[in-house]
Amino acid sequence: MPERDYMMLVITGLNAKKEKLYANDHKRGFEDIPLHYSFHRLLEEVEELKAEFMKRSEIGIDPRTNYAALRAEFADIGIFADMGILECDRKLARGSQ
């Protein structure tokens, strides 16, 4: 089996998320986001991705699919997942299980 390029996957996601973070820099920061907030926002973003995808795929993949919009929604999901990971890491560093 060929070796997987994990870094390509990580860097691609990182770049998309960084673009979204800079575009939304005027919004509340992530430094003090509670875990439950990250979780609920992640679920909301999944619903937004689903809505964006479904409006384009009712008859299958449409050549007019807005991949930029899909990419942005995937990036939002990743950002809220990262916020949850950050909060978990903070709790683990303080000795929580």
Image (cartoon, rainbow, N blue to C red):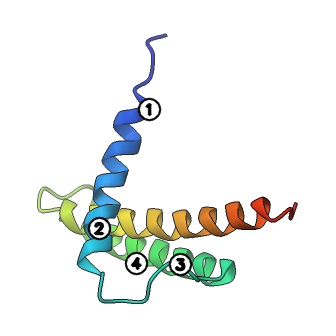
| CA–CA distance in space, label 4 to label 2 | 10 Å
Front disc: 3 or 1: 3
Res. 55 in view: no
Q: Amino acid at mark 4?
A: Glu
Give yes or no for contact between labels 2 and 3 (Cβ–Cβ under 8 Å).
Answer: no
In the displayed image of the protein, which residue is found farthest to the bottom?
27
- Dot 4 falls on a residue whose secondary structure is helix
Left or right? Give the position of 78 relative to 34: left
- Dot 2 falls on a residue whose secondary structure is helix
Give the residue at mark 3.
31
Q: Of the two numbered discs 2 and 3 on the same chain, state the one appearing first in sequence.
A: 3
- Dot 1 falls on a residue whose secondary structure is helix
Left or right? Give the position of 70 relative to 35: left
Give yes or no for contact between labels 1 and 4 (Cβ–Cβ under 8 Å).
Answer: no
Give the residue at mark 1.
6
Give the residue at mark 4.
48
